[in-house]
Image (tube, rainbow, N blue to C red):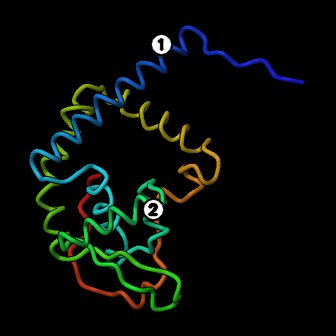
Amino acid sequence: MAHSPRWLTSEEQRAWRLFLTANHILFSALEGQLQRDSDITHGYYEILVRLSEADDHALRMNQLAEASTSSKSRLSHAVARLEERGWVERIDCPTDRRGQVARLTDLGYAALEAAAPGHAEQVRRSLFDRLTSDQVSQLADISEAILTGAPPGEGGLADGLGGCATACDSELEAERPAAIPTS
């Protein structure tokens, strides 16, 4: 027996279209600022941020893919481009011959450190300056509800987006400054 489609109500349709348009405008502004000021895409910036926040500034490639909500093949391509710039290095995992680890280099950290202030200002200008403190709390609650409801494998909280512990961390110790607190 076929189920009837669950069509959106007019209010849901309005909310959905506003959500899509707002996301498009927000991410276009973020992408434009990063490209213009730092010659980096938002996707590459997110990879650098995730690595800067990880222990020893390193994550296994599969953990980095989950954390940055990228497919493994897309992440592999992005890490290759970041390696060409000298911002990331890919090394074999010493405890698992099949695994690879991406590690943020000092040059990559410096690039992230240079890009972060402009990016944070653009996030503030494009999003937070337009919201009340109650709306910021609502946005966090709504975002968490969406992520909590995402099935495993679709990038939700069940997939570990809140934080990624790295395997092989005892082998990858390096002294670097603390993570840059923006994404």
Dividing the picture into quadrants, the one containing residue 112 is: bottom left
Q: Please, what is the three-letter code of the amino acid marked with disc 1? A: Arg
Is 63 positioned to the left or the right of 49 in the image? right
Q: Position of residue 62 (x, y in %)?
A: 49, 68
Q: Residue at x 60, y 54 (%)?
A: 153
Q: Give whichever of discs 2 and 1 has the lower sequence position.
A: 1
Q: Please, what is the three-letter code of the amino acid marked with disc 2? A: Ser
- In the rendered image of this protein, does residue 47 appear above or below residue 146? below
Q: Position of residue 30 (x, y in %)?
A: 23, 40
Q: Nearer the viewer, residue 143 or 14?
A: 14
Label ID, residue 6: none
Q: CA distance from mark 2 to mark 1?
A: 35 Å
Q: Look at the numbered disc 2 and give the secondary structure of its residue.
A: helix
Is 31 positioned to the left or the right of 73 in the image? left
Is 97 positioned to the left or the right of 179 in the image? right
Q: Would you name the residue on which mark 2 appears?
A: 73
Q: Would you name the residue on which mark 1 appears?
A: 14
